[in-house]
Image: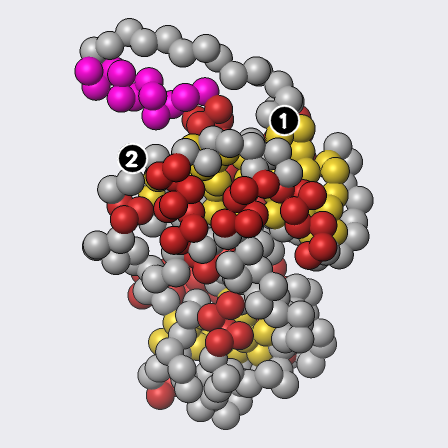
Amino acid sequence: MGRQMIRIGFYGSSKEMAHWNATLGARLGDIEIHDLQSDAGQQCDVALVWAPPQDVLASCPNLKGIILQGQGVDHMMRDETVPRDIPLVRLVDPDMSDALSHWAILNALDFWRDGAHYRASQAQREWQPRAQRPATGARIGIMGIGAIGSVIATRFAALGFSVRGFARTERQLDGVEVFAGQDRLMAFADGLDVVVSVMPLTPDTTGIINAEFIRCLNPGAFIINGGRGPQIDDEDLLAALDSGQVGGAALDVFDVEPLPQDHPYWTHPNVRVWPHVAAQTNADTAAEQVSAAITRIMAGEDPANRVDWSRGY
Ligand code: GLV
């Protein structure tokens, strides 16, 4: 008996759709993949999407589950038309955790080793050594130590950093000092040289990196945001960059994306703007878990990495 044909509604570029068609087809056999907004796409069993327009998911009569092409679910939380009684699955792809940890390490080490200073010196043909910061012991704090943050924290520990983790609830992580709960936030921030956020966006994390938080950091600290833009209070960060309380920032996510042309981040000498590329979805590495999720959804079973609507991720 042949397997039942599975119809997938896709929201993303047509190039990505062709790629998923190949990787999922190789695993699931008889599938059809259509643009979610087409008539055939609206008849889908499962939707594979990233930030679809409002109402499009709500109008699919056969929809049994929704799978996201990324890790963050904040855009789904904001859309009240998304059906909440069927599984919503987020990607938890080790390849994306690797990519995000590389990006965080790249930016942290570039700051720690004065990359900006030496690039500026080279542009002027100036030989201008600076005293090297200690090779070990820099205090780094990772905000969010789940699937991605725990990989980042462990890798910084292996590089000789002294690593703290900030989490919503208590957990153990080898070589990492964990601070759990909002009331531990300032103790977590106290004296940090580098902060990395990879938290999901929730009411608790919105505006969490503000003037009060920044005051607790070591003067001249570096802030790396690979979580979500609204976690940083932009006005407070810009003021701290201007006063020198913050020495620099590497930002991959913003309140509004693409970052508006007139935003001061674009031209600030100590800010590095990345266009939301720290960890891009890889249809080759993610296909295994997406096909497993589709199989479970089609069988009426609970898929892994199901989003908890009440928790917010
Ligand atoms: C990217 O930001 C993601 O959430 O996967």
85 over 240 or under it: above or below: below
Asked if residue 115 lies in the magenta stretch, the reply is: yes
User: Mark 2 sits on what residue?
Assistant: 269
Closer to the chain start, of discs 1 and 2, is 1
Towards the viewer: 107 or 138: 138
- Looking at the rendering, the stretch of residues picked out in magenta corresponds to 113-124
- Residue at figure coordinates x 57%, y 15% from the top left: 134
Disc number placed over residue 32 in the picture, else none: none
Which residue appears at 35% of the width and 82% of the height?
Answer: 37
Instruction: Assign the C terminus to one quadrant of the image.
Output: bottom right
SS for callout 2: loop
Q: State the image coordinates of residue 276 (x, y, percent, origin top left).
A: 39, 51
Image position, residue 3 (x, y; %): 60, 76
Q: Amino acid at mark 1?
A: Phe
Q: Is residue 69 above or below residue 161?
A: below
Residue 277 seen in the figure: no
On the rendered structure, is 34 left or right of 208? left
Disc 1 crowd rating (10 Å Cα; few below 14, some 14-19, many 20+) is many
